[in-house]
Image (cartoon, rainbow, N blue to C red):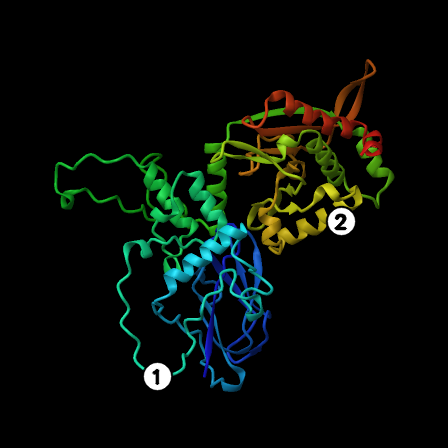
Amino acid sequence: MTIRTFELPDLGEGLTEAEVVKWLVAVGDTVAIDQPIAEVETAKSIVEVPTPYGGVVHALHGAEGEVLAVGSVLISVADEAEAPAAPSEPAAPAPAVPEPAAVSAAGERYREEERAGSGSGNVLIGYGTPEAGARGRRRRPRGAVAAPAAAPAAPVAPESPAARRVPLVTSPLVRRLAREAGLRVADIEGSGQDGLITRRDVLAAIEAARAPVAAPAAAPAAEAVPAPAPVPAGAVDPRTGLAESARMPMSGFRKSVAAALSRSRSEIPEATVWVDVDATELVRLRAAHPDGPGLLSYVARFTVAGLRAHPELNGLVDTERGELVQYDGINLGLAVQTDRGLVAPAVLGAHRLTTAELDTEIKRLTAAARAGRATPAEMTGGTFTLNNYGSLRVDGSAAIINHPQVAILGIGRIIDRPWVVDGELTVRKVTQLSFAFDHRVCDGGAAAGFMRVVADAIEDPAAAIARL
Protein backbone atom coordinates (compact mmCIF):
# COMPACT_ATOMS: atom_id res chain seq x y z
CA MET A 1 0.00 0.00 0.00
CA THR A 2 1.26 3.46 -0.91
CA ILE A 3 0.34 6.37 1.35
CA ARG A 4 1.13 9.87 0.18
CA THR A 5 1.18 12.83 2.54
CA PHE A 6 0.33 16.37 1.55
CA GLU A 7 1.81 19.21 3.57
CA LEU A 8 0.16 22.56 4.32
CA PRO A 9 1.48 24.85 1.55
CA ASP A 10 2.73 28.41 1.78
CA LEU A 11 -0.48 30.38 1.19
CA GLY A 12 1.33 33.60 0.35
CA GLU A 13 2.82 36.70 2.03
CA GLY A 14 5.30 34.61 4.01
CA LEU A 15 2.63 33.36 6.43
CA THR A 16 3.93 30.59 8.65
CA GLU A 17 0.75 29.00 9.99
CA ALA A 18 -2.96 28.52 9.33
CA GLU A 19 -5.97 27.34 11.32
CA VAL A 20 -8.06 24.42 10.12
CA VAL A 21 -11.55 25.93 9.99
CA LYS A 22 -13.42 23.02 8.42
CA TRP A 23 -12.60 19.66 6.92
CA LEU A 24 -14.42 19.11 3.62
CA VAL A 25 -13.63 15.38 3.56
CA ALA A 26 -13.55 12.57 6.10
CA VAL A 27 -11.37 9.52 6.61
CA GLY A 28 -12.41 6.87 4.10
CA ASP A 29 -13.70 9.34 1.49
CA THR A 30 -12.51 9.04 -2.08
CA VAL A 31 -10.91 12.23 -3.37
CA ALA A 32 -9.77 13.38 -6.81
CA ILE A 33 -6.75 15.47 -7.73
CA ASP A 34 -7.37 19.17 -7.01
CA GLN A 35 -10.50 18.47 -4.97
CA PRO A 36 -10.83 20.89 -2.02
CA ILE A 37 -10.20 19.01 1.21
CA ALA A 38 -10.19 21.73 3.87
CA GLU A 39 -10.92 25.36 4.61
CA VAL A 40 -8.01 27.03 6.41
CA GLU A 41 -7.80 30.54 7.83
CA THR A 42 -4.61 32.54 7.66
CA ALA A 43 -3.96 36.04 8.92
CA LYS A 44 -5.24 37.21 5.53
CA SER A 45 -8.32 35.22 4.55
CA ILE A 46 -10.09 31.86 4.51
CA VAL A 47 -9.10 29.68 1.56
CA GLU A 48 -9.89 26.20 0.33
CA VAL A 49 -6.89 23.90 0.01
CA PRO A 50 -7.06 21.19 -2.68
CA THR A 51 -5.25 17.87 -2.60
CA PRO A 52 -2.58 17.12 -5.20
CA TYR A 53 -3.30 13.39 -4.88
CA GLY A 54 -6.25 11.20 -5.76
CA GLY A 55 -7.28 8.16 -3.72
CA VAL A 56 -8.82 7.39 -0.36
CA VAL A 57 -8.35 9.66 2.65
CA HIS A 58 -6.19 7.71 5.07
CA ALA A 59 -5.78 10.31 7.83
CA LEU A 60 -6.54 13.93 8.63
CA HIS A 61 -3.65 15.53 10.48
CA GLY A 62 -5.26 18.14 12.68
CA ALA A 63 -8.62 18.85 14.22
CA GLU A 64 -10.91 21.73 13.29
CA GLY A 65 -9.73 24.80 15.18
CA GLU A 66 -6.14 23.56 15.38
CA VAL A 67 -3.34 25.81 14.11
CA LEU A 68 -0.83 24.05 11.83
CA ALA A 69 2.56 25.31 10.73
CA VAL A 70 3.28 25.68 7.03
CA GLY A 71 5.07 22.52 5.91
CA SER A 72 3.41 20.24 8.47
CA VAL A 73 1.40 17.26 7.21
CA LEU A 74 -2.21 18.13 6.42
CA ILE A 75 -3.67 14.93 4.95
CA SER A 76 -2.60 11.41 4.01
CA VAL A 77 -4.07 9.73 0.91
CA ALA A 78 -3.81 6.03 0.07
CA ASP A 79 -4.10 4.45 -3.35
CA GLU A 80 -7.77 3.70 -3.91
CA ALA A 81 -7.19 0.10 -4.93
CA GLU A 82 -5.06 -0.59 -1.85
CA ALA A 83 -6.80 1.49 0.80
CA PRO A 84 -7.27 -0.34 4.12
CA ALA A 85 -9.92 0.28 6.72
CA ALA A 86 -9.39 3.87 7.72
CA PRO A 87 -8.78 4.99 11.31
CA SER A 88 -11.68 6.78 12.97
CA GLU A 89 -9.71 9.80 14.26
CA PRO A 90 -7.03 12.07 12.81
CA ALA A 91 -3.62 10.55 13.09
CA ALA A 92 -0.59 12.38 14.40
CA PRO A 93 1.98 13.43 11.79
CA ALA A 94 4.62 10.83 11.10
CA PRO A 95 8.12 11.79 12.25
CA ALA A 96 10.26 13.25 9.54
CA VAL A 97 12.91 10.90 8.12
CA PRO A 98 16.09 12.70 7.04
CA GLU A 99 16.84 12.21 3.36
CA PRO A 100 20.43 12.35 2.09
CA ALA A 101 19.44 14.51 -0.89
CA ALA A 102 17.23 16.90 1.08
CA VAL A 103 19.78 19.70 1.35
CA SER A 104 20.87 19.59 -2.27
CA ALA A 105 17.29 19.33 -3.50
CA ALA A 106 16.31 22.26 -1.33
CA GLY A 107 19.17 24.30 -2.67
CA GLU A 108 18.17 23.51 -6.24
CA ARG A 109 14.57 24.50 -5.51
CA TYR A 110 15.79 27.77 -4.00
CA ARG A 111 17.93 28.51 -7.06
CA GLU A 112 15.05 27.69 -9.43
CA GLU A 113 12.77 30.11 -7.63
CA GLU A 114 15.44 32.82 -7.63
CA ARG A 115 15.82 32.46 -11.41
CA ALA A 116 12.07 32.45 -11.96
CA GLY A 117 11.49 35.39 -9.62
CA SER A 118 8.22 33.78 -8.56
CA GLY A 119 6.68 32.60 -5.33
CA SER A 120 6.38 29.10 -4.06
CA GLY A 121 4.52 27.66 -7.03
CA ASN A 122 0.84 26.98 -7.45
CA VAL A 123 -0.67 27.07 -3.99
CA LEU A 124 -4.31 26.35 -4.79
CA ILE A 125 -5.71 24.53 -7.83
CA GLY A 126 -3.00 22.41 -9.38
CA TYR A 127 -0.62 22.76 -6.42
CA GLY A 128 1.98 20.01 -6.56
CA THR A 129 0.06 17.74 -8.92
CA PRO A 130 2.13 15.17 -10.80
CA GLU A 131 1.48 17.00 -14.08
CA ALA A 132 3.01 20.18 -12.63
CA GLY A 133 6.51 18.80 -12.75
CA ALA A 134 9.19 19.39 -10.17
CA ARG A 135 8.89 23.16 -9.82
CA GLY A 136 7.47 24.94 -6.78
CA ARG A 137 7.28 23.66 -3.22
CA ARG A 138 6.39 20.08 -4.03
CA ARG A 139 8.32 17.74 -1.79
CA ARG A 140 8.79 14.02 -2.02
CA PRO A 141 6.14 12.49 0.28
CA ARG A 142 7.74 11.30 3.47
CA GLY A 143 5.01 8.75 4.06
CA ALA A 144 5.44 6.90 0.76
CA VAL A 145 6.45 3.26 1.07
CA ALA A 146 9.61 2.60 -0.88
CA ALA A 147 10.21 -0.58 -2.87
CA PRO A 148 12.40 -3.18 -1.12
CA ALA A 149 16.05 -2.35 -1.60
CA ALA A 150 18.30 -4.92 -3.22
CA ALA A 151 21.12 -4.14 -0.82
CA PRO A 152 21.54 -2.11 2.35
CA ALA A 153 22.14 1.55 1.66
CA ALA A 154 25.65 2.82 2.14
CA PRO A 155 26.26 4.90 5.25
CA VAL A 156 25.55 8.58 4.69
CA ALA A 157 28.62 10.75 5.02
CA PRO A 158 28.33 13.57 7.54
CA GLU A 159 27.21 16.86 6.04
CA SER A 160 29.85 19.49 5.57
CA PRO A 161 29.24 22.92 7.12
CA ALA A 162 28.81 24.36 3.64
CA ALA A 163 26.12 21.82 2.77
CA ARG A 164 24.25 22.55 5.98
CA ARG A 165 24.19 26.24 5.19
CA VAL A 166 22.41 26.02 1.85
CA PRO A 167 19.60 28.51 2.56
CA LEU A 168 16.18 26.84 2.23
CA VAL A 169 13.78 29.71 1.55
CA THR A 170 10.76 29.07 -0.67
CA SER A 171 9.04 32.45 -0.27
CA PRO A 172 10.46 35.45 -2.15
CA LEU A 173 8.68 37.67 0.36
CA VAL A 174 10.73 36.14 3.17
CA ARG A 175 13.92 36.67 1.17
CA ARG A 176 12.95 40.29 0.51
CA LEU A 177 12.28 40.85 4.22
CA ALA A 178 15.78 39.60 5.01
CA ARG A 179 17.33 41.79 2.30
CA GLU A 180 15.52 44.90 3.52
CA ALA A 181 16.89 44.26 7.01
CA GLY A 182 20.43 43.81 5.66
CA LEU A 183 20.59 40.12 6.63
CA ARG A 184 21.97 37.15 4.70
CA VAL A 185 19.57 34.22 4.61
CA ALA A 186 22.54 31.87 4.85
CA ASP A 187 23.15 33.25 8.37
CA ILE A 188 19.59 32.55 9.56
CA GLU A 189 18.62 29.29 11.23
CA GLY A 190 15.39 27.89 9.79
CA SER A 191 12.78 26.43 12.14
CA GLY A 192 10.51 25.02 9.44
CA GLN A 193 10.38 21.65 7.69
CA ASP A 194 13.83 20.50 6.57
CA GLY A 195 15.31 23.75 7.93
CA LEU A 196 12.91 25.98 5.97
CA ILE A 197 13.53 29.65 6.78
CA THR A 198 10.18 31.25 7.59
CA ARG A 199 9.07 34.85 8.08
CA ARG A 200 9.10 34.22 11.83
CA ASP A 201 12.78 33.19 11.66
CA VAL A 202 13.69 36.39 9.78
CA LEU A 203 11.78 38.59 12.23
CA ALA A 204 13.55 36.87 15.12
CA ALA A 205 16.91 37.47 13.44
CA ILE A 206 16.01 41.14 12.92
CA GLU A 207 15.13 41.53 16.60
CA ALA A 208 18.35 39.80 17.59
CA ALA A 209 20.36 42.12 15.35
CA ARG A 210 18.70 45.18 16.87
CA ALA A 211 19.29 44.05 20.45
CA PRO A 212 22.26 45.77 22.13
CA VAL A 213 25.34 43.67 22.68
CA ALA A 214 25.50 42.78 26.35
CA ALA A 215 28.65 43.49 28.31
CA PRO A 216 30.42 40.52 29.89
CA ALA A 217 28.48 39.46 32.95
CA ALA A 218 30.22 39.98 36.24
CA ALA A 219 28.23 37.22 37.90
CA PRO A 220 27.63 33.66 36.69
CA ALA A 221 24.68 33.21 34.38
CA ALA A 222 23.01 30.94 36.90
CA GLU A 223 22.60 33.91 39.23
CA ALA A 224 20.68 35.97 36.67
CA VAL A 225 17.28 37.15 37.82
CA PRO A 226 14.53 35.24 36.00
CA ALA A 227 12.03 37.19 33.90
CA PRO A 228 8.81 38.00 35.76
CA ALA A 229 5.94 35.64 35.08
CA PRO A 230 2.88 37.01 33.25
CA VAL A 231 0.32 38.61 35.54
CA PRO A 232 -2.62 36.19 35.86
CA ALA A 233 -6.07 37.31 34.74
CA GLY A 234 -7.94 39.12 37.48
CA ALA A 235 -4.80 40.37 39.16
CA VAL A 236 -4.31 44.02 40.10
CA ASP A 237 -2.27 46.07 37.64
CA PRO A 238 0.58 47.62 39.67
CA ARG A 239 0.70 50.76 37.50
CA THR A 240 -2.98 51.75 37.65
CA GLY A 241 -4.13 49.90 40.75
CA LEU A 242 -7.07 48.51 38.79
CA ALA A 243 -8.08 44.88 38.54
CA GLU A 244 -7.76 43.26 35.12
CA SER A 245 -11.18 42.20 33.87
CA ALA A 246 -9.90 39.86 31.14
CA ARG A 247 -6.86 38.65 29.22
CA MET A 248 -7.02 37.08 25.79
CA PRO A 249 -4.34 35.94 23.35
CA MET A 250 -3.85 37.95 20.17
CA SER A 251 -5.17 36.11 17.12
CA GLY A 252 -2.92 35.47 14.16
CA PHE A 253 -4.82 38.18 12.30
CA ARG A 254 -4.24 40.81 15.01
CA LYS A 255 -0.55 39.86 15.21
CA SER A 256 -0.24 40.30 11.45
CA VAL A 257 -2.00 43.69 11.58
CA ALA A 258 0.14 44.83 14.49
CA ALA A 259 3.36 43.85 12.72
CA ALA A 260 2.35 45.56 9.46
CA LEU A 261 1.22 48.81 11.09
CA SER A 262 4.25 48.95 13.40
CA ARG A 263 6.52 48.48 10.41
CA SER A 264 4.72 51.26 8.53
CA ARG A 265 5.13 53.68 11.43
CA SER A 266 8.78 52.78 12.00
CA GLU A 267 9.93 52.86 8.36
CA ILE A 268 7.81 55.46 6.55
CA PRO A 269 8.32 59.23 7.08
CA GLU A 270 4.64 60.01 6.77
CA ALA A 271 2.94 63.34 6.08
CA THR A 272 -0.79 64.11 5.93
CA VAL A 273 -2.83 66.70 4.03
CA TRP A 274 -6.59 67.17 3.89
CA VAL A 275 -9.22 69.24 2.12
CA ASP A 276 -12.97 69.84 2.46
CA VAL A 277 -14.83 69.11 -0.76
CA ASP A 278 -18.27 70.15 -2.01
CA ALA A 279 -19.79 66.83 -3.12
CA THR A 280 -23.24 68.24 -3.93
CA GLU A 281 -23.01 67.57 -7.67
CA LEU A 282 -21.73 64.06 -7.11
CA VAL A 283 -24.65 63.31 -4.78
CA ARG A 284 -27.05 64.71 -7.40
CA LEU A 285 -25.47 62.54 -10.10
CA ARG A 286 -25.91 59.48 -7.94
CA ALA A 287 -29.53 60.38 -7.14
CA ALA A 288 -30.29 60.88 -10.84
CA HIS A 289 -29.11 57.32 -11.57
CA PRO A 290 -30.23 55.20 -8.58
CA ASP A 291 -29.44 51.98 -10.43
CA GLY A 292 -26.00 53.22 -11.47
CA PRO A 293 -22.62 53.09 -9.71
CA GLY A 294 -22.36 54.01 -6.04
CA LEU A 295 -20.56 57.07 -4.69
CA LEU A 296 -17.47 55.06 -3.73
CA SER A 297 -17.13 53.76 -7.29
CA TYR A 298 -16.98 57.34 -8.61
CA VAL A 299 -14.38 58.25 -6.00
CA ALA A 300 -12.40 55.13 -6.96
CA ARG A 301 -12.47 56.21 -10.60
CA PHE A 302 -11.29 59.70 -9.69
CA THR A 303 -8.53 58.19 -7.50
CA VAL A 304 -7.28 56.18 -10.46
CA ALA A 305 -7.18 59.40 -12.48
CA GLY A 306 -5.19 61.09 -9.72
CA LEU A 307 -2.66 58.25 -9.67
CA ARG A 308 -2.24 58.46 -13.43
CA ALA A 309 -1.44 62.15 -13.05
CA HIS A 310 0.96 61.47 -10.16
CA PRO A 311 2.37 57.94 -10.70
CA GLU A 312 5.01 58.39 -7.98
CA LEU A 313 2.21 57.75 -5.48
CA ASN A 314 1.49 54.35 -7.03
CA GLY A 315 4.70 52.53 -6.21
CA LEU A 316 7.13 51.61 -3.45
CA VAL A 317 10.51 52.51 -2.00
CA ASP A 318 13.20 49.90 -2.69
CA THR A 319 15.48 50.68 0.24
CA GLU A 320 17.93 47.92 -0.66
CA ARG A 321 18.73 49.46 -4.04
CA GLY A 322 17.96 53.05 -3.16
CA GLU A 323 15.31 53.35 -5.87
CA LEU A 324 11.76 54.66 -6.17
CA VAL A 325 9.58 52.17 -8.06
CA GLN A 326 6.46 53.07 -10.04
CA TYR A 327 3.95 50.46 -11.23
CA ASP A 328 2.62 50.14 -14.75
CA GLY A 329 -0.96 49.62 -13.60
CA ILE A 330 -3.08 50.16 -10.49
CA ASN A 331 -4.38 47.58 -8.01
CA LEU A 332 -6.70 49.73 -5.92
CA GLY A 333 -6.91 48.54 -2.33
CA LEU A 334 -10.12 49.14 -0.36
CA ALA A 335 -10.23 49.23 3.43
CA VAL A 336 -13.00 46.83 4.47
CA GLN A 337 -14.20 46.32 8.05
CA THR A 338 -14.94 42.64 8.71
CA ASP A 339 -15.77 40.50 11.72
CA ARG A 340 -12.09 39.51 11.83
CA GLY A 341 -10.83 43.08 11.65
CA LEU A 342 -9.82 45.64 9.04
CA VAL A 343 -8.48 44.24 5.76
CA ALA A 344 -7.52 45.92 2.48
CA PRO A 345 -8.21 43.68 -0.54
CA ALA A 346 -7.43 45.15 -3.93
CA VAL A 347 -9.36 45.59 -7.16
CA LEU A 348 -6.74 44.13 -9.48
CA GLY A 349 -6.25 46.10 -12.69
CA ALA A 350 -8.47 48.98 -11.56
CA HIS A 351 -6.95 51.24 -14.23
CA ARG A 352 -8.63 49.14 -16.93
CA LEU A 353 -12.17 49.38 -15.51
CA THR A 354 -14.99 51.80 -16.18
CA THR A 355 -16.97 53.33 -13.32
CA ALA A 356 -19.71 50.71 -13.74
CA GLU A 357 -17.15 47.90 -13.82
CA LEU A 358 -15.45 49.31 -10.72
CA ASP A 359 -18.82 49.34 -8.97
CA THR A 360 -19.42 45.67 -9.77
CA GLU A 361 -15.93 44.66 -8.69
CA ILE A 362 -16.02 46.71 -5.47
CA LYS A 363 -19.30 45.05 -4.41
CA ARG A 364 -17.95 41.58 -5.21
CA LEU A 365 -14.61 42.20 -3.50
CA THR A 366 -16.03 43.67 -0.28
CA ALA A 367 -18.49 40.78 0.02
CA ALA A 368 -15.68 38.27 -0.52
CA ALA A 369 -13.48 40.00 2.05
CA ARG A 370 -16.21 40.00 4.70
CA ALA A 371 -16.82 36.30 4.04
CA GLY A 372 -13.07 35.58 4.19
CA ARG A 373 -13.07 34.48 0.54
CA ALA A 374 -10.81 37.07 -1.05
CA THR A 375 -7.88 35.45 -2.83
CA PRO A 376 -4.29 35.79 -1.60
CA ALA A 377 -3.51 37.90 -4.68
CA GLU A 378 -6.35 40.28 -3.84
CA MET A 379 -5.33 40.46 -0.19
CA THR A 380 -1.67 41.22 -0.85
CA GLY A 381 -1.49 42.81 -4.31
CA GLY A 382 -2.63 46.38 -3.62
CA THR A 383 -0.54 49.31 -4.88
CA PHE A 384 -2.61 52.10 -3.28
CA THR A 385 -5.42 52.11 -0.69
CA LEU A 386 -8.74 53.99 -0.62
CA ASN A 387 -10.37 54.15 2.82
CA ASN A 388 -14.06 55.04 3.06
CA TYR A 389 -14.26 55.76 6.79
CA GLY A 390 -17.36 57.82 6.11
CA SER A 391 -19.21 54.50 6.21
CA LEU A 392 -18.31 54.45 9.93
CA ARG A 393 -19.95 57.90 10.34
CA VAL A 394 -16.74 59.82 11.01
CA ASP A 395 -15.46 62.91 9.24
CA GLY A 396 -11.71 62.40 9.10
CA SER A 397 -8.79 60.18 9.96
CA ALA A 398 -5.00 60.26 9.93
CA ALA A 399 -4.71 56.81 8.37
CA ILE A 400 -1.61 54.62 8.52
CA ILE A 401 -0.07 53.73 5.14
CA ASN A 402 -0.41 50.08 4.18
CA HIS A 403 3.28 49.09 3.86
CA PRO A 404 4.93 48.66 1.35
CA GLN A 405 2.57 51.09 -0.38
CA VAL A 406 3.45 54.77 -0.20
CA ALA A 407 0.08 56.50 0.19
CA ILE A 408 -3.52 56.13 1.37
CA LEU A 409 -6.55 58.29 0.62
CA GLY A 410 -9.48 58.55 3.01
CA ILE A 411 -12.95 60.00 2.51
CA GLY A 412 -15.24 60.97 5.38
CA ARG A 413 -19.02 61.08 5.63
CA ILE A 414 -20.96 63.47 3.39
CA ILE A 415 -23.06 65.85 5.49
CA ASP A 416 -24.92 69.15 5.12
CA ARG A 417 -22.68 72.12 5.94
CA PRO A 418 -22.81 75.87 5.35
CA TRP A 419 -20.83 76.72 2.22
CA VAL A 420 -20.21 79.86 0.21
CA VAL A 421 -21.10 79.64 -3.50
CA ASP A 422 -20.69 82.70 -5.71
CA GLY A 423 -20.53 84.91 -2.65
CA GLU A 424 -23.76 83.50 -1.21
CA LEU A 425 -24.01 81.37 1.92
CA THR A 426 -25.89 78.13 1.25
CA VAL A 427 -26.14 74.54 2.47
CA ARG A 428 -24.09 71.99 0.51
CA LYS A 429 -23.15 68.33 0.74
CA VAL A 430 -19.58 68.46 2.05
CA THR A 431 -17.03 65.73 2.73
CA GLN A 432 -13.40 65.71 3.82
CA LEU A 433 -10.54 64.02 2.00
CA SER A 434 -7.44 63.12 4.00
CA PHE A 435 -4.28 61.90 2.36
CA ALA A 436 -1.24 60.33 4.02
CA PHE A 437 1.87 59.88 1.87
CA ASP A 438 5.47 58.72 2.14
CA HIS A 439 7.62 61.88 2.07
CA ARG A 440 10.44 59.89 0.49
CA VAL A 441 8.59 59.58 -2.84
CA CYS A 442 7.37 63.16 -3.20
CA ASP A 443 6.89 66.51 -1.50
CA GLY A 444 3.76 68.38 -0.54
CA GLY A 445 3.29 69.85 -4.01
CA ALA A 446 2.74 66.45 -5.63
CA ALA A 447 0.48 65.35 -2.77
CA ALA A 448 -1.60 68.52 -3.12
CA GLY A 449 -1.75 68.04 -6.88
CA PHE A 450 -3.12 64.52 -6.46
CA MET A 451 -5.68 65.76 -3.93
CA ARG A 452 -6.90 68.48 -6.29
CA VAL A 453 -7.40 65.99 -9.13
CA VAL A 454 -9.68 63.92 -6.91
CA ALA A 455 -11.39 66.89 -5.21
CA ASP A 456 -12.05 68.76 -8.47
CA ALA A 457 -13.57 65.62 -9.98
CA ILE A 458 -15.89 65.19 -6.99
CA GLU A 459 -17.00 68.82 -7.25
CA ASP A 460 -17.65 68.57 -11.01
CA PRO A 461 -18.12 64.86 -11.75
CA ALA A 462 -19.76 65.28 -15.17
CA ALA A 463 -16.81 67.21 -16.56
CA ALA A 464 -14.33 64.79 -14.95
CA ILE A 465 -16.01 61.72 -16.41
CA ALA A 466 -16.06 63.37 -19.85
CA ARG A 467 -12.27 63.79 -19.62
CA LEU A 468 -11.53 60.27 -18.37
Within 10 Å of the Cα at label 1, are there few (<14), some (14-19), or many (20+) other Cα atoms?
A: few
The x and y percentages for residue 403 are: 53, 38
Q: Residue at x 66, y 23 (%)?
A: 448
Q: Residue lying farthest left?
A: 219
- CA gap between label 1 and label 2 equals 63 Å
Q: Is residue 243 visible?
A: no
Q: Are marks 1 and 2 in contact (CB under 8 Å)?
A: no
Q: Nearer the viewer, residue 414 or 294?
A: 294
Using the image, determine if residue 231 lies above or below residue 459: below
Inspect the image, locate mark 1, and give the three-letter code of the amino acid beneath it.
Ala
Residue 368 image-quadrant placement: bottom right
Q: Residue lying farthest top?
A: 423
Inspect the image, locate mark 2, and give the three-letter code of the amino acid beneath it.
Thr
Q: Residue at x 67, y 49 (%)?
A: 366
Report the disc number at residue 150. Answer: 1
| Relative to 228, 53 lies left or right | right
| Relative to 255, 234 lies left or right | left
| Relative to 306, 58 lies left or right | left
Q: Quadrant of the N terminus?
A: bottom left
Q: Nearer the viewer, residue 316 or 341?
A: 316
| Relative to 423, 410 lies left or right | left
Q: Residue at x 40, y 56 (%)?
A: 196
Q: Badge 2 is on which residue?
A: 360
Of circles 1 and 2, which is in front? 1
Q: Quadrant of the C terminus?
A: top right
Q: Is residue 56 visible?
A: yes
